[in-house]
């Protein structure tokens, strides 16, 4: 079987996060010892650079949870939502092993297996650790990760270390019980429900204790935090300082998902979601104290594939049951693929990242949205389900984050205005997608149709299809230099128009 081709048109050196503020870049992790950076730099869930090449998967073996979060509603047998806590199939440990081996054989770029739900893995210790035990034996080339709310973490640190799990994610939304009481209605602790501030205090104490125990064992800890406007947006700055002091190496601040149709308490009560500007401002503020992760996709608990894609439908149990998997043979192919990717990444890391040329002093930064795939400007505007957001400035290009959009184009000849978002809505899918790109001044795509081109320009966003199939950062830098040549980056410029 032929090995996948590793494109020479890969992302520019150091990936999208090599500027300060994105936790996965080598310079942003410079405070870490070399052996820790070596573990992180090729991990798709931690490295913005590596996630263009390496894939991950989650297995849904942990249905029960021991806390209630106002932003969570676990859904089973659901294929229509893309957010944490949602799965299409609940698996037994044996089924999970069968699925992992099949996916790893079919997708050799898959290097990481995580258990993240749909409940809390450590509230289901038997199912969780049996899955890890079998994987350690049958697929030793796969890295193992677990995500937890931290309530039961201290009692399971020994077991985590025993199974060679060297990456753990803890969701920590607060370090103040009064803030916590607004996020967590109750916890289930020592065979009883404990409500309000008292429950939040216990949860916080357990999270901090578990974090410290893990880092003392040399186990890498990433902290996830959900940004909830009016509840913890300022408080998360303190959270970032505290978890760094306890030894966490990376902080991932994620936006609250609170759409009413998801059935969460926050969604039903009309809790607002953070704006993109609020999220970026908070991430930038926290970056002064802690390495920040900005490429998180808030994956489903059964996600499969590269970050930003989900191939779970290809690997349902009915399909896996008829597959003939020779994992020993697959491991040979997987090693060749991994070695080729690592060689490519190492070559990129050895190249100094250039700064834009000919940029006048005092020029302002510009946000650009990119319909990207595998590090290239490779998506048609109407086919993109997300846009990668980059900031270009006189200091260079840095990755800011991603914005999810709806697929409104049904094919090359079916890219009209699209259906309304919902019955009776006044906004089309195209209009909503353009609104989601608010704040961006340019959108780079492989191709843009006439209708979206006109609407983008009317919204003050310049469409650009001139850099199709080019590495993203090189394309962003080139466009920034083109804009600079018009003198519209200087402070007196009050608008941007790109011909």
Image (cartoon, helix red, strand yellow):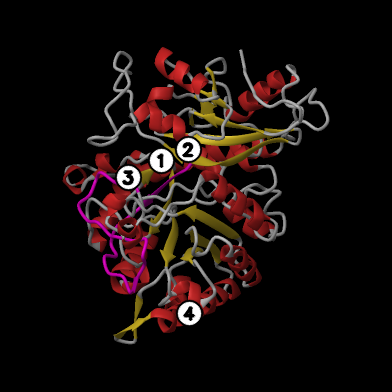
Residue wearing tag 4: 206
| Few, some or many residues within 10 Å of mark 1 (<14, 14–19, 20+) | many
Using the numbered discs, state the Cα–Cα distance from disc 2 to disc 1 in whole angstroms.
7 Å
Task: Estimate the x, y position of residue 94 in percent, counting from the top left.
Answer: 24, 60
Using the numbered discs, state the Cα–Cα distance from disc 3 to disc 1 in whole angstroms.
8 Å
Quadrant in which the C terminus appears: top right
| Few, some or many residues within 10 Å of mark 3 (<14, 14–19, 20+) | many
Residue 436 left/right relative to 441: left
The residue closer to the viewer here, 238 or 96, is 238
Q: Which residues are magenta?
A: 53-82
Depicted 56 relative to depicted 436: above or below: below
Q: Are marks 4 and 1 in contact (CB under 8 Å)?
A: no
Q: Are marks 2 and 1 in contact (CB under 8 Å)?
A: yes
Residue 62 painted magenta: yes
| Few, some or many residues within 10 Å of mark 2 (<14, 14–19, 20+) | many
Residue wearing tag 3: 103
Q: Disc 4 or 1, which lies upstream in sequence?
A: 1
Could you say whether the residue bearing mark 3 is in a helix, strand or loop? helix
Q: Disc 2 or 1, which lies upstream in sequence?
A: 1
Q: Disc 3 or 1, which lies upstream in sequence?
A: 3
Could you say whether the residue bearing mark 2 is in a helix, strand or loop? helix
Report the mark closest to the observer, 4 or 2. Answer: 4
| Few, some or many residues within 10 Å of mark 4 (<14, 14–19, 20+) | some
Residue wearing tag 1: 108
Q: Are marks 3 and 2 in contact (CB under 8 Å)?
A: no
């Amino acid at each position: 079987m032929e090995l996948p081709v590793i494109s020479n048109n890969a992302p520019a050196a150091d990936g999208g996060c090599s500027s300060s503020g994105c936790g996965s870049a080598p310079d942003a992790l410079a405070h870490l010892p070399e052996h820790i950076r070596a573990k992180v730099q090729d991990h798709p869930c931690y490295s913005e650079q590596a996630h263009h090449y390496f894939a991950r998967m989650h297995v849904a073996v942990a249905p029960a949870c021991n806390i209630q979060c106002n932003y969570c509603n676990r859904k089973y047998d659901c294929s229509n939502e893309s957010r944490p806590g949602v799965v299409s199939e609940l698996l037994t440990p044996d089924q999970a092993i069968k699925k992992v081996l099949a996916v790893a054989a079919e997708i050799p770029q898959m290097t990481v297996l995580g258990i993240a739900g749909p409940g809390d893995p450590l509230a289901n210790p038997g199912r969780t650790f049996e899955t890890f035990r079998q994987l350690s034996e049958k697929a030793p080339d796969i890295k193992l990760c677990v995500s937890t709310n931290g309530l039961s973490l201290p009692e399971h640190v020994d077991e985590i270390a025993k199974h060679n799990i060297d990456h753990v994610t803890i969701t920590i939304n607060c370090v103040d019980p009064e803030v916590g009481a607004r996020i967590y209605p109750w916890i289930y602790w020592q065979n009883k429900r404990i409500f309000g501030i008292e429950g939040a205090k216990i949860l916080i104490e357990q999270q901090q204790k578990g974090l410290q125990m893990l880092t003392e064992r040399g186990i890498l800890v990433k902290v996830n935090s959900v940004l909830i406007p009016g509840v913890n947006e300022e408080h998360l700055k303190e959270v970032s300082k505290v978890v760094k002091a306890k030894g966490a190496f990376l902080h991932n601040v994620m936006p609250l998902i609170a759409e009413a149709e998801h059935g969460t308490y926050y969604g039903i009560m009309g809790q607002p979601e953070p704006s993109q500007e609020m999220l970026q401002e908070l991430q930038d503020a926290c970056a002064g104290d802690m390495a920040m992760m900005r490429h998180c996709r808030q994956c489903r608990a059964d996600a499969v594939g590269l970050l930003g894609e989900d191939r779970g439908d290809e690997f349902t149990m009915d399909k896996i049951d008829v597959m003939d998997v020779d994992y020993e043979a697959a491991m040979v192919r997987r090693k060749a693929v991994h070695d080729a990717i690592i060689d490519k990444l190492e070559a990129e890391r050895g190249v100094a990242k250039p700064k834009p040329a000919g940029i006048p002093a005092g020029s302002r930064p510009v946000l650009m949205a990119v319909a990207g795939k595998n590090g290239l400007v490779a998506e048609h505007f109407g086919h993109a389900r997300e846009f990668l957001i980059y900031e270009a400035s006189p200091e260079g290009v840095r990755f800011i984050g991603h914005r999810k959009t709806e697929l409104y184009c049904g094919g090359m000849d079916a890219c009209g205005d699209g259906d309304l978002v919902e019955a009776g809505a006044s906004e089309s899918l195209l209009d909503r997608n353009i609104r989601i790109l608010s704040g961006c001044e340019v959108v780079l795509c492989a191709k843009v149709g006439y209708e979206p081109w006109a609407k983008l320009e009317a919204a003050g966003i310049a469409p650009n299809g001139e850099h199709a199939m080019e590495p993203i950062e090189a394309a962003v830098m080139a466009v920034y230099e083109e804009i600079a040549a018009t003198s519209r980056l200087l402070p007196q410029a009050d608008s941007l128009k790109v011909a």
